[in-house]
Image: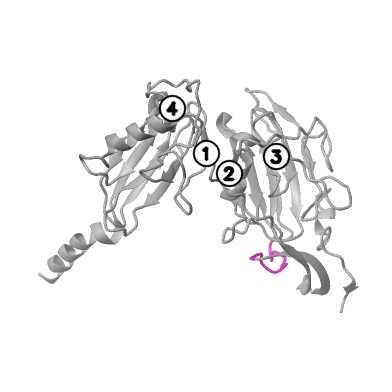
Amino acid sequence: MYSSTVAFALAALAPSAFGAILDVNVGPNGQFVYEPPSVHAMTGDIVRFHFNPKNHTVTQSSFDTPCVGVAEGFRTGFIPVAAGTSPLPVQEFTVPDNGGAPLWFYCGQTGHCGQGMVFAINPPAEGDHSFAAFQQLAIAQNGTAATGSATPPASTSTAADTYTTPPPPKWEHATKTVTWGGQTYATTYTSYEGTPEPTPAVTPQDHKIIVGPDGQLVYNPSNIQAAINDTVTFEFRPKNHTVTQSSFSNPCVGLTKDDGTSGFKSGFQPVAADATTFPTFTIKINDTAPIWGYCGQVNHCQSGMVFSINAVESGPNNFNAFRQLAMRPQNTSSQTGGSNTGGSNSGNNSGNNDSAAVALSPAAALTVLAGAFTLFAAFL
């Protein structure tokens, strides 16, 4: 009897404790729609958006201006999806405790909202604030009648751009005494707000990032954390991509450091569709400062093909902000050519930068705290 009572209590608690999951398809079958176009949900429920091929967003707006994002509202950023992708990428939205008030959303891709690609949570069934009224207002303010076609309309949205560029990262030079491998070093390094202290990994590891898996314009994973002395190996899949270092504020432009030298560059790496072995490009982590990078192939960076290492996710200069900045309309890529920086033509190339250094050989990989660290008093 006691067990039955407990089971019943847990069953009764489950919906409110964990929330229901409501699935919504974004752009199914090439249509400019969310399917279903609206849902009714309770506080704590999760709306799970499944992004279909093409490049859409889910951006929170208001009823009065359907195609203008609200400050501090929910934004997925652009999610480019190649045809044939499986499984589809997913973004989740947890319904807040707002007393059941309606929530309004739209697709931020040019012309999509103006064709009626909008979505709502808890809209009234009827009246001047129903979902149908919201969709009609989006079309009236920002475009022509929705056609359901995958072809964008000739006219584009004239809604004000409310995007706010994140502030540039701030850093300072710091000094730290580090004990590693039985020896003590005094080091100077670049310290960003939120970055950990420069403590080398006890057991260095190699992190693998796949470049362009399954024909997608992505790095997988695209955002990782790596310790000092770890290595990061980029493995190139079919098509022709690059790994090019950039900066947070200029995601699609190759990095030029203060001393005039360039950040790491793999150069273009063409890979045949039937390839069974894949070229790689390896960097070694010498600092905890964030590393930003992109693909230099035409329009790939603008499609969101960027990556970060040691991004500070708790601040404004996080990976999603970097990716959204890369996809802004004004961005253009600086092409990286066919050469690489710090590598060879053997298929296993290496790059140099302030936070990542060349891994020339197993012996060279034993060099402690090279690159960004200035060893000014060893063996203290």
Residue 99 is inside the magenta segment: no
Question: Residue flagged by tag 4: what amino acid is it?
Answer: Gly
Marking on residue 78:
1
Q: Could you classify mark 3 by the number of other residues whose Cα lies within 10 Å: few (under 14), some (14-19), or many (20 or more)?
A: many
Say if 232 sits above or below 219 in the image.
Answer: below
* Residue at mark 3 to residue at mark 2: CA–CA distance: 12 Å
Instruction: Note whether residue 363 is visible.
Output: no
Pick the front one: 228 or 90 = 90
Marking on residue 252:
3
Q: Check contact, mark 1 vs mark 2: CB within 8 A.
A: yes
Q: Secondary structure at mark 2?
A: helix
Snapshot quadrant of residue 279:
top right
Mark 4 vs mark 1, foreground winner is 4
Q: Check contact, mark 4 vs mark 1: CB within 8 A.
A: no
| Quadrant assignment for the N terminus | bottom left
Query: Which secondary structure class fits the magenta region best?
Result: loop
Question: Residue flagged by tag 1: what amino acid is it?
Answer: Phe
Q: Could you classify mark 1 by the number of other residues whose Cα lies within 10 Å: few (under 14), some (14-19), or many (20 or more)?
A: many
Q: Name the residue: 82% across, 70% down.
A: 187
Question: Residue flagged by tag 2: what amino acid is it?
Answer: Gln
Marking on residue 143:
4
* Residue at mark 1 to residue at mark 2: CA–CA distance: 7 Å
* Residue at mark 4 to residue at mark 1: CA–CA distance: 20 Å
Place of residue 234 in the rendered image (x, y in percent of width and height, measured from the top left): 68, 42
Question: Which portion, as a residue range, is magenta?
Answer: 194-203
Residue named by callout 2: 324
Q: How is the image coloured?
A: one colour
Q: Name the residue: 82% across, 46% down.
A: 256
Q: Secondary structure at mark 1?
A: loop
